[in-house]
Amino acid sequence: MSEETLYIQHFHAGAASLAYYQEKMQGYQAFPKAFAMGQAKVIDEVKVSALRGRGGAGFPTGMKWGFIPQASPKPKVLVCNADESEPGTFKDRELLRYTPHLLIEGMLIGAYAIGARSCYIYVRGEYVAEARILEQALKEAYAAGLLGEKVCGLDFACDITVHRGAGAYICGEETALLNSLEGKRGEPRVKPPFPAQSGAFGCPTIVNNVETLTAVPFIISRGGAWFASLGRIEKSGGTRLISVSGDVKKPGVIEIHAGSMTIRQIIFDACGGILGDRPLKAVIPGGSSAPVLTADEIDVIYDIEPLAKIGTMMGSAALIVVSDAHCMVKLIARITKFYAHESCGQCTPCREGCRWMEDVLERIEHGHGRVQDLGLLTDIADQIQGKTLCALGDAAAGPVMSFVKKFRADFEAHIRGGKCPNAS
Ligand SMILES: Cc1cc2nc3c(=O)[nH]c(=O)nc-3n(C[C@H](O)[C@H](O)[C@H](O)COP(=O)(O)O)c2cc1C
Ligand code: SF4
């Protein structure tokens, strides 16, 4: 894109070193500035920036930091969610791989703002190389006095520990992540209490996504108002990294000013259009948990509120593009299989409902479906939605409902014909 970008120009070999971060990105200059500002002013600046969580829910970061009970005698904890488990999402991987020091400095500032000494980075188990890069960056930072007892020679102590997950989707949910971090079974906790009151090891805790934390040094160096002005839409500041995958000519991570492009512009202008110039069939706009859009619905601004208004979500900003080469029934059957497999099993609607939807979708896909199965699918999804402990239930139910509603003819053709109409 032609406008100013924060990240994308640094996504190349050699950018992960401390030397690069200090020489090319004014690295570790924002933390001393934040320290001089004082905790409350740092939180205010992040509020002004209109930075919203990049992990999925889009919660305002400054407000979240403000929930930490500063008067609590317990130690405060900052956790970076680097689980990146939502299918279709791979933007945090680029940040971990190429800009680990930006994350470390963002965590330092966040830790200072909430009064935490102990910080953790919970890294997706499959990100083996990225965990190594992070460990190397932490080693460099400790050796240079940027972490440990006196950060940058100032009266502030901070430690960051990398904790590797074991490959469970549910451990991206913040309370399951905290259980896993504590060595327990990775399943979501009942809320309240929310992590800001009682999180890691029972201490007040903030969990933030990788991209969220990497925005913080920019906010402190150049000001919250400047960051907010990068957004082209009310309430969303900064730029957004978007993982684009599927049937596009140029898949990958792109960076846009928040709210500056429609889905159509992202697909056809930024990503070169549809593979093989085939017709577009559908778009999943926010990772596989987001309700699907048809090809007629892509003239929508790609940001949180505009997508919510048309019944879907931006989620983790992962845009999955589907051409007419694919079977929609097979696609939703595969997505549902994933959620059924990843359900932690604590709540009956999610545990039983996901597996049941998987069974029904598989029989339709393989030509053994019945006309009444479409109503059954909607009923099961309705029994899951809004009735579970964590959002995985909604993540499984919402897509099923939207696929059946928007691509009903495809399901009916499978049921009537006894097979996929596109199968040879
Ligand atoms: C099932 C499930 C999976 C999630 N996976 C991730 C993930 O992989 N990475 C992430 O940052 N947030 C994930 N989240 C959101 C986190 O619970 C949490 O809201 C987020 O880490 C907060 O950070 P943020 O405010 O910076 O967005 C997930 C949520 C749910 C319900
Ligand atoms: S909704 Fe599913 S994944 Fe979430 S707590 Fe309940 S059973 Fe576990």
Image (cartoon, grey):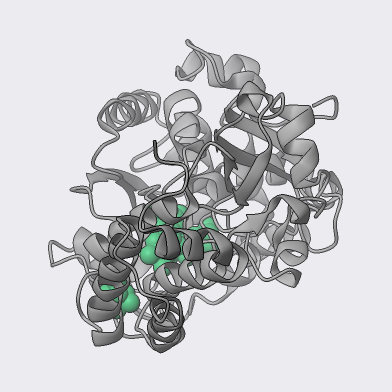
Please identify the quadrant where the N terminus is shown: top right
Q: Is residue 342 left or right of residue 220?
A: left
User: Does residue 71 appear in this view?
Assistant: yes
Up/down of 91 relative to 84, above or below: above
Q: Residue 144 or 239: which is nearer the viewer? A: 239
Q: Quadrant of residue 255?
A: top right
Q: Residue 242 or 43: which is nearer the viewer? A: 242
- Picture residue at 39% right of the left edge, 28% below the top: 141
Residue 247 in the image, given as x and y percentages of width and height: 57, 32
- Picture residue at 27% right of the left edge, 44% below the top: 161
- Picture residue at 50% right of the left edge, 71% below the top: 398
- Picture residue at 45% right of the left edge, 75% below the top: 394
Q: Residue 409 or 272: which is nearer the viewer? A: 409
Residue 165 in the image, given as x and y percentages of width and height: 22, 48
User: Does residue 74 appear in this view?
Assistant: no
Q: Quadrant of residue 131?
A: top left
Residue 392 in the image, given as x and y percentages of width and height: 38, 70
Q: Is residue 152 left or right of residue 239?
A: left
Up/down of 342 relative to 165, above or below: below
Q: Is residue 69 left or right of residue 120?
A: right
Q: Residue furthest top?
A: 14
Residue 189 in the image, given as x and y percentages of width and height: 28, 79
Question: Image quadrant of ligand 1?
Answer: bottom left
Please identify the quadrant where the C terminus is shown: top left
How many marks can you see?
0
